[in-house]
Image (cartoon, rainbow, N blue to C red):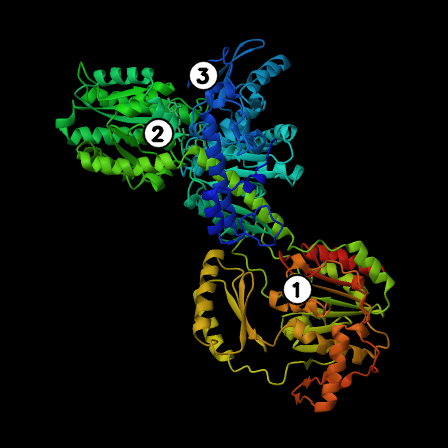
Amino acid sequence: MSISSQEICILPNKNNLALLQTNGMPGNLYNICSNLPATPTRLERLLRDRELRKYSKCLNDCEAELPSSTQDCFSPDLETSTCWFNDEELLEPVSASRSLNDDGERLDFRASKQRLLVVANRLPVSAVRHGEDSWQLEMSVGGLVTALLGVKEFDTRWIGWAGVNVPDEIGQKALAKALDEKRCIPVFLDEEVVHQYYNGYCNNILWPLFHYIGLPQEDRLATTRSFQSQFDAYKKANQLFADVVNEHYEEGDVVWCHDYHLMFLPKCLKERNSKMKVGWFLHTPFPSSEIHRMLPSRLELLRSVLAADLVGFHTYDYARHFVSACTRILGLEGTPEGVEDQGKLTRIAAFPVGIDSERFIKALELPEVQDHMKVLKQRFAGRKVMLGVDRLDMIKGIPQKILAFEKFLEENPNWRNKVVLLQIAVPSRTDVPEYQKLTSQVHEIVGRINGRFGSLTALPIHHLDRSLDFHELCALYAVTDVALVTSLRDGMNLVSYEYVACQESKKGVLILSEFAGAAQSLGAGAILVNPWNVTEVASSIGYALNMPADEREKRHHHNFKHVISHTAQEWAATFVSELNVTIVEAQLRTRQIPPPLPIEVAVDRYSCSNNRLLILGFNATLTEPVDTLGRKDSQINEWEPKLRPDLQEPLRKLCDDPKTTVLILSGSARNVLDDNFSDYNLWLAAENGMFLRVTTGDWMTTMPENLSMEWVDSVKNVFEYFTDRTPRSQFEVRETSLIWNYKYSDVEFGRLQARDLLQHLWTGPISNASLDVVQGRRSVEVRSVAVTKGAAIDRILGEIVHNKGMKEPIDYVLCIGHFLTKDEDIYTFFEPELPSEVPASVRPQVPTQVRTSTAGSRAALLLKQNSMSAVEQNKSYSIDGDTLHLMVTDRISFQEGSSVLDLQANDYFSCSVARKRSNSRYRLQSSDEVVTLLRELADHR
Ligand SMILES: O=P(O)(O)OC[C@H]1O[C@H](O[C@H]2O[C@H](CO)[C@@H](O)[C@H](O)[C@H]2O)[C@H](O)[C@@H](O)[C@@H]1O
Ligand SMILES: O=c1ccn([C@@H]2O[C@H](COP(=O)(O)OP(=O)(O)O)[C@@H](O)[C@H]2O)c(=O)[nH]1
């Protein structure tokens, strides 16, 4: 019998029973499998997932204790390969995890392992060709490989470049076959692409920029010139990766893209299959948005990463920088969850990587490691040994490290023959000129210092330009007294983790750069340094070498605990779990997003009807879309909205159609609507419907009689104060509301100011008033509770019907707008059976029953009621200057039993524009689509 992870929950034991009950769902033990509507929070989901993982790990561990004959274990055949780590079990395919259930029945967990496609530039093995169809595979070096090799919980396949050019088909086939045994799938890149994409765009542009080094000094202009062709190659290479993923993808797979090489990949994948679960993780720092905005391709890169469902970074700082780049450069909304764009949320979070600590700890017991340790101890007997292990990369701060060591020797002559620095500098990206230069620079400094402080028998620096095998490396980690990590920037730095893992008996000291991601997790036990400050590093070396045993022990203990509990396995499992949860949540959220307006249907119903009402919002509905993409933030266009020129013609046609009444219903002031629409034959409702006029007539007010505006002066004071202190913000005093707008200000500063402003309002002038504070995307508006579009519409409708002397009820309503939530009561006005708060998820999108006003339409009902109450109460409104206060209720001339509205459900189209969540039945993405719609309607009289 095979069971899926979904079904695991029906096997509770005492432990997970306790957990499920503490997850906020008392008495609902089987909630995960039940059909009950309780929707768990993200935290509940993640906790449950974590518990299930532990549970299944526990079963797997039990299985490990079964006699080997009962296990169906894979034994890799690496006869043809030499492995750098000589640790081929790391690449084993998924082993069948089997266990017995309570009835002695065998459970096969093979099916419960989720398929994971890891896509990274580099495969864990690099290929070396030995003949036409013969390949040797060697382990690749670098933290990414180390981290991902620790991932064992999934049925993993690795897709990547084998680090070699294979132009011929025979070679490609043979290599694909050899790699298949390692569950690796090659992406073949030709030399030119590798040169432009990997050496060029990735390692000469993105890498230095993301590490705050800036573009290479000498060939900066050349780089600037070749930028476009390198970026094209980058996109091309990413597309090649996408093609291979698509070829191997099976429904339900998780596709996990890695690193700066593949920032374009999420977009390529999602364009082809929007349902694919795509995660992207960056192993390097993500720099401040000020750095990222220097990239000519800044927009495209951000946009394509955002196509992923989940985006992960090593630290909160990197995640914060990314979100800030999205807000500042793309103008998108950053929320605590991630980044939102048109209702799509890309979740952004920090997932600090770890190592497979057990592997290092166990390795120390191996005879070959013990042998290495013995040799090393003898070789350096009587001297303290300091260790540096880095790829030879400018980000690692190797010259700075060596200079600090020189300074230490300079200032501490007593240590000169008593300490040695072993520096392993693994050659890396040797085709990139900057790396070549670094090699000679380091050699030169090492030579100088050895010449200065060395003797015939001892040298202060042992510098190795090569990699070590795993056993040698573990031995070195274990016997050395101090590890020196001086990265100028480093995504994480796993060497520091590995050092700590191997120091359980010696309790050596870790000196760690504060610019490495690892400083966030190992900072408590390490000595943190600024690698640029050579004096500080030199004195830290002295401090470390002289540190008393009890302090070393405490510091080590702190870090060791962290390293063994934050493993690579846990990192990957958490990321994938979060990705799965993100997908579930996105599905739930999607249900709250109204479907696109079926334009054809709306047009078709329009042409079949005889008395139509078109209610159109103004801002962001009939104006150009809010300019966010690639905006030049400093450009203030116009504060006042303007009707899109391409809408003039269709709007005029619609207004001139005798069967159609057009109402512009807006928050804008009267003069703004006058400026834009005076020439059209339509109705204008300004200030959210508080003022009304037909363009051939004068303004009248529909304002409730007792509307108090006493609060205005005090709110104005607060708005003035914040306008003064927020560059490029502005406030507007309307007759029924006050609006502070910061759409042209610095987004983040504007938001902070808005938060502050709200606090002032709540605790000050409006605390006792009957007001609403309405937060827009980049605005704060204060208006009386009674002022909403929905509240005004019945009065407006009454006036229109009366004024036009309508003999026939309205049989078609299209209501579209970029309305604030407060004003969405306009949508539900025409749907009396549902309260406006009802979430879209439970709202029938297209009700099938036919409603007529006589059977309960709110408009007809209200009009009748108002009419009666007006007659009964004999209410009237006064004339105030040029404003006629409307007594709408006594103007209803319809006879009892007849109706103002005779609206069938499928003749009503409420539609939000450019809103992510809405109570409308439908949505349009932007005012561009409004243009299409109105053009179509205008052509169907
Ligand atoms: O593949 P290469 O070009 O030879 O470079 C090796 C790797 O270097 C980078 O490693 C990063 O990932 C580590 C693990 O997350 C992290 O600890 C370290 O700080 C990073 O520098 C690079 O990001 C990888 O893609 C490369 O494979
Ligand atoms: O001779 C060596 C030296 C180092 N490493 C490994 O390379 C990785 C370096 O990762 P780190 O995160 O420190 O930096 P990166 O090189 O990825 O920037 C570590 O796992 C080391 O064990 C290696 O494989 N061979």
**Label drawn at residue 642:** 1
Residue drawn at (58%, 35%), measured in percent from left and top?
Answer: 254
**Which residue is label 3 attached to?**
83
Residue 648 is situated, as x and y percent measured from the top left of the image, at 75, 62
- Can the viewer see residue 134? yes
Check contact, mark 1 vs mark 3: CB within 8 A: no
**Which residue is label 2 attached to?**
498
Q: Earlier in the sequence, mark 1 or mark 3?
A: 3
Is 432 on the left or on the right of 424, as rendered? right
The quadrant of the image that shows the C terminus is: bottom right
Q: Earlier in the sequence, mark 2 or mark 3?
A: 3
Does 439 appear above or below 321?
above
Mark pair 1, 3: CA separation: 68 Å
Q: Amino acid at mark 2?
A: Glu
Residue drawn at (78%, 61%), measured in percent from left and top?
Answer: 650
Q: Residues within 10 Å of mark 1 (few under 14, many from 20)?
A: some
